[in-house]
Amino acid sequence: MIASSATAAAAEALVVRALGPSARSFPAGKKLADDARITLQANDTLVLLDSRGTRTLRGPGTFTPSGPAQANNRSAIASVAGGPARRARIGAVRNVGGATDVRPASIWHVDVAKSSNVCLTDPAHVTLWRADATKPVTLTVTRASDGANRTVQWQAGEPTVSWPSDLAVTSGAQYRLNWGGAEKPTVVTFKTLAAEPPEPEAMASTLIENDCDAQLDVLIAALERPAMAAATPEN
């Protein structure tokens, strides 16, 4: 079992995403003091998360993590991380450019198109998700360690389907997902958590520590709704 990360300290901000020329200086999971001075170059984007919410910094300029933040949307967190009784669908998330990015309704759903580690809290109940549910699909799930495989029939119009009940999900095990029309199999490795992290900062830290990148993308998309304006540099 993998222990969940503790909630980030209030006086620190957690780096959840970094893009651009300075990205190597701000790896996901890095913590920055509230009074840290952050210098970004042109085309840099840095997304920070702390107890106050999320903040997007775009270079060029110099910033501090203590500036105004987009308040954490607890209903958004519940929608992607909560149990079925209080889960709302994210569905389509509209990007700044107007394009529609379809994401799973829950961070616990396994996106069959993305090879990644997958964090989960209940290995007995795993749900597979696909972005395009217009056609029926026969999905083959293969356990890499011994070649054991099962097929799953995905009906048209169904975005989710249950993991095959007679193929146990084991923490640390690797599985290949393949179906007709796929360019190559998707490879997922499950990481079982001891408990669901209760706060956004702890959730993000846990996903980063376990390299559950596809789930981190879903969490960030939920935290950033509605789209927020970039922070203004100090210089």
Image (cartoon, helix red, strand yellow):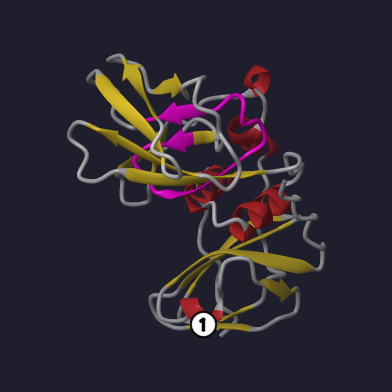
Assess whether residue 115 is covered by the magenta stretch.
yes
Q: Position of residue 209 (x, y in %)?
A: 63, 60
Count neighbours of disc 1 (C-alpha within 10 A) and say few if under 14, some if 14 to 19, many if 20 or more: some
Total labels drawn: 1
Q: Quadrant of the C terminus?
A: bottom right
Which residue in the structure is indicated by mark 1? 61
Answer with left or right where residue 106 lies relative to residue 143: right
The answer to whether 124 is drawn above or below residue 192 in the figure is: above
- First to last magenta residue range: 110-130
**Residue drawn at the location 49% of the way across and 31% of the way down:** 90
**Residue drawn at the location 37% of the way across and 47% of the way down:** 95
Q: Is residue 106 at all visible to an observer of this figure?
A: yes
As rendered, which of 181 and 57 lies closer to the eye? 181
Quadrant in the rendering for residue 198? top right
Assess whether residue 67 is covered by the magenta stretch.
no
As rendered, which of 167 and 29 lies closer to the eye? 167
Answer with left or right where residue 152 lies relative to residue 45: left
Task: List the single residue furthest toward the front.
Answer: 146
As rendered, which of 124 and 220 lies closer to the eye? 124
Answer with left or right where residue 10 lies relative to residue 76: right
The answer to whether 128 is drawn above or below residue 191 in the figure is: above
Q: Position of residue 2 (x, y in %)?
A: 71, 50
As rendered, which of 199 and 58 lies closer to the eye? 199
The answer to whether 21 is drawn above or below residue 203 in the figure is: below
**Residue drawn at the location 47% of the way across and 81% of the way down:** 22
SS for tag 1?
A: strand
Q: Is residue 70 at all visible to an observer of this figure?
A: no
Answer with left or right where residue 159 lies relative to residue 33: left
Q: Position of residue 9 (x, y in %)?
A: 82, 63
**Residue drawn at the location 46% of the way across and 22% of the way down:** 164
Identify the amino acid type marked 1.
Gly
